[in-house]
Every structure is written in C-alpha cells, then in structure tokens.
Amino acid sequence: MTSTAAADIGTDVGTKNVRRRTVAQAIVEYLQVQYSELDGERRRLVAGMYGIFGHGNSVGLAQGIDEYGVDFPHYQGKNEQSMVHAAIGFAKASNRAATLACTASAGPGSTNMISGAATATTNRLPVLLFPADIINNRFGDPVLQQIEHPVERDVSANDCFRPVSRYFDRITHPAQLLSTLPEAMRVLTDPVETGAVVVCLPQDIQGAEFDFPESFFTPRVWHIRRRPAVEDEIRDAAEIIRNAQRPLLIAGGGVRYSKAQEELARFSTEFGIPVSETFAGKGSGPISELNVGALGVTGTVGANEIADGADCVITVGSRLQDFITASHSLFQNPDVKFVHLNVSSFDAHKMGSFPVVGDARLSLSALREWLAAAGYGTSEAFRSDVADAQKATREVRKHDLQAFPGEKMSQAQVIEVLNKQATSEDALILGSGGVVEGIHKAWDPSNGTEIHFEYANSCMGHEIPAGLGYRLARPDAPGEVFVLIGDGTYLMQPTELVTAVQERKKIITVVIDNRGHQCIWPLQVSKGGPGREFGTQYRERGNTSGRLDGAVLEFDIAANAASMGCAAWSTTTIEEFSAALTEARKVEGPAVIVAKVEPWRYLSGNGSFWDVGVPMTSQRPGSQEGTAKHLEGRARQRYYAATTAPEAG
C-alpha cells in the first residue's frame, strides 16, 4: 500500500523527533504511557486490552499489541459484549480511575459490543472501545460484513455506537490520532462526561504508517479533580435544608465514586437525617440506626414511608431513575423540596432539584459547616418516626426469611446465608433479575462487603465478566469476589468463566436456579391476573397447546460450569448451600454454586408504583383489572416544580 507520509501535515520527516508507526502500533505505545491520578494515587489509565481477533483487527491491533505491547496485557475474551462488561467491572474496582480497552473484528464482532457500551454510558463508567471498521479506501466495495446504505455511503455498522457513546470518532487518517486519543483520555477521566469512548478503526487504516511526533509518546498524567461547588449554591442549599422538619438523604453511586461515605455518615449523624440508598449507592450509607436502607420500587417499607412524608429530599450523586423515585410517585408531601449534590449539572437539576454542582464529598463537608453554624437538627419526634419505620422493615424482613411449609429454600434465604458469610474483605457483583430486589431490600451492609450493582441498564450477562474485571483490577485483594445471578443470566453469558480459568483469576458465582425469568412472573400476574404468565419459564412446548407450557426443562448448570474448568456444586437446601460456600472459599480457581430455589417465592411488596406499559384494551377480566389498578398508580405520579433559593432577607 502507499505510505501515508508525515509531510501531509508538515512533520519534519527524517529527523529524530518522529516515530514511524502504524496506527495500531501508535495506539498501543500511546496507551502504555497514559496515567490517571486521583487523590494523589497514580496508576495506568488503560491497563490492558481485551480482544477477539478476526480479519478486521488481527493484522492491525493484534500485531501492534504483539510487537509493541511491552507492558500491555491482552485478555482473550469469549464474547465481545462480555469484554466490555469486564472493562466495566475493572473501572468500578478502580473507582473510575482506570479501565481496560476492548477491540473486536469488523461487523458483528464490533456490534456485539454495543450493549456493553450502553451499559457503561448509562452507568457513567469509563471504557475504551476500538471496534474494527470496513476498509476506508473502498476499492473493494462491498466488502465482507459491510452495510450498504443507498444514500449515506460513509455509514457503517459501527455508527450504531453513536447514541450509546460519550465520545465517538472514526479514524480515516493516521494524523487524527494526535487529537483523538488525547480527547478520548480526557473523556475517560472526566467524572461528568465519562462513559463509553468509541474510536472506530477501518481495517486498512490500522496498518497505515505515519511519522508521529516523538512528543506524542511522552508520558502524561490525567488528573481527576475534585471540583468544589460555588459558595452561593452551598449557602442557598443549606437554607433550604435548614427549614426542613422531615428531611431524607438519598445516597447514590456518586457517594462511592467520591469516597464520601465517612462525610455522609457524619452529616447524617450530626443532624439526625435518615439515609436511603439507590442501587449504585447500596452500602454507601452509614452503619447506624439512621440508615433506612433501599428506596423505591425495591425499597424497604420503612424507607418508603419516610420518603412519602419527606419535606426535603437531599440527593447525593444519583441519576434518580424510575425505580428509585417510583416513577415520580414516591414523594407525596405537597411541599416537598429537592436539593441535589452532583458533579454533573445535568443530573443535579433533575426533578426540579436545587442544584449543588460539585464533588459530593466537598459539597457535603461545606453544607455541614453551614448547617452546624445554624444549629440545625431534626426533632426527637421525627427520629422516633424513623425508628418506627426501621422496626416495620425488620418485621417484613423476618417474615420473608422464614421457611415456608412445603416449599424449597427461598431466594431470600440463600441471600441471607451469603450475607452472613461475606466479610468486609469481599466484594459482591450483581446487576439483573430477582436478586436485585433481594440485595437492594434485604442485604444487611453492616458486614462491610463492597457491593457493585449494575442496575442503570440492568444488562443480563453483565455480572460474570464484571466480576472477572473486578478481580483483574484487584488481583491481590485478600477477599473473595462473589457474583450473584439467576439461571437466565447464566444461560445468556457464562463463557467468561473460561477466561477466568485461563487467567487463573478466582470468582465465586452463585446461581439462583428457579427455571426461568421468574422475576417477570409477578409483574405479568399483577397486570394480567392469575395464570397469565407467558414466555418467562423454561418449559417444553406443550403437545396440545403448541405453547411453552409443558414440562419444566431439565438441565444441569453445575455440570456445565464444571465442563468449563470451574469447581461446581448443585444445592437444594440451605445447609448444602452454606457448606458449598465454605468449600468454595478453599478452592484456588473459579467456582460456581447453584442454589435451586422455590420458583415463585419473592420478597414482600412495599406498595410502591412502577410505570410500565399496560394493555389499554383487552378482553380478559384479569388484564382489565390489572390495567385499572395500574392507572390508579399513575394518578399518584407528580410533577415536582423547581426548588428555588429562599428570598434574601
């Protein structure tokens, strides 16, 4: 092929201040000298690259890593989507200060990464993706795996990444790396803008040569700064809170990423303000009687009771998604005001909140000083109400953990055993299915286990690779990495267990086996009436009906996991499950424990509303009744007017 001469952009070819490399080689060398620094801790920003190599990248990025990857490990993923989820787990374990890059071949290999990109962007987590693209020169059109758009000739399958990316580019000339890669690093390390960074690499461009300036490969540190909120916002927010009689704090994922747990606990204790937790914020609240636990659709009855009457809701680092706000029906006090501490102005203004835009830890500290100076504190009567709400939560939890006559062990009981055995050195990874409610509502965080939810995108298949990514980021951490999933998730994406075996990285996967996507069953029944579940259970096709309503399928998840190199157990009683957990801690490699539970035994509901689509016309009485009840719930949805600063004087 014709060389891409550096003279195209005026670089002094032939001098010692340039480095002739292909695009792929330059990417590898550049990434190896990029560092992040957060609170004085410096680390490699992109610690390695996951890759499945096909014709689109095997002689491009693969060659670059092989020849120039001096300190740049390659991880051999088994599914392209899973590679991105592993990078997400790595980013979470690194508190968003480091991540992994991922590359896939052109066509379906690359588009398989789109769900992972959406998961990263929705969760505000940094991942770096290099999807291979069709050939830039077009001499051979149409090439293998090319989508031919009849009007927009420059469109490729990779344009599907655009709506799920925080940064998107396609390299059509090597010189573009000089601006694109630094911008990619900036987005990865910006807590406001971070998410999926996608740099598409046409196959021929990966191997194109160029004289890159030597200074391009100079090591660089990207500082992740704590941005303070402006004093006016702190002052006015303090005044709003000072007038509250029944305030409630919401701890979101921003508490964790800001490392603001201690400051939040101090804030709560000093002023007597109860704390509720989102999914990403689970375990970030204080270990005290003021932590009322999970909030919203999968929240505790106590937290939701306090939320219903709250006159001031102080959110710290949350997206305030519909599960947390009960689709804007949770906060029913007619005079409720909202204050939102968030590093992102976009999030800080949600639900008409008064925004405090800045780092969560700095903002909490500044607010605490203002409120302390004003002598603020909640009343004994309110604190007594909080205690009563906590008591109600404990009673419901006790009911849900009992052994029900004639039934198998419940999912709640399995989670309780795991809760009791987990320690402050362990981590728990989860993200979809019925286990979400079990952990959000019933897990006791006082044991200090680090919990990593993915429930912004609720992507089934995220959990096993994310657990592996967490372990890759913390290979020497003393505790265990537990992955908690359902059988539906296992069947979608178990193959990164092979990668865990390959890398000799231990994770313990707990599979709740209830023979289907059973967490959807209660939703279908509540909207359609008894017997109205459809397509959610693993059953054979019936001979008479022609539908999937025959015998329950028999398959052995533990045997499948063992075939991939894992230690595996299949358990049917709490005693067996507890013993398997103990044994799993002793093995050296990946382990899988299957817990066969009662299919339709779930935690008690809390009466909150969640807005989903319902059939507005149906001939079935059950559907008509379910729709009518759902419309009653919609009547509780509220518009929350903007919370404004108090008038001066």
Image (cartoon, grey):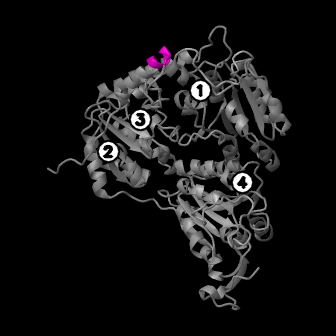
Q: Is residue 623 magenta?
A: yes
* Left or right for 320, reference 28: left
Which residue matches tag 1? 519
Identify the secondary structure beneath mark 4: helix
The answer, for residue 533, to whether it is visible in the render is: yes
Picture residue at 42% right of the left edge, 28% below the top: 303
* Residue mark closest to the camera, 1 vs 4: 4
Vertical relation: 199 (above or below) 415: below
Identify the secondary structure beneath mark 1: helix
Amino acid on which disc 2 is placed: Gly
Query: Which x, y percent locates residue 45?
Result: 62, 62
Label tally: 4
Which residue matches tag 4? 109
Q: Earlier in the sequence, mark 4 or mark 3?
A: 4
Amino acid on which disc 3 is placed: Thr
Residues drawn in magenta: 619-625
Residue 352: give its label: 2
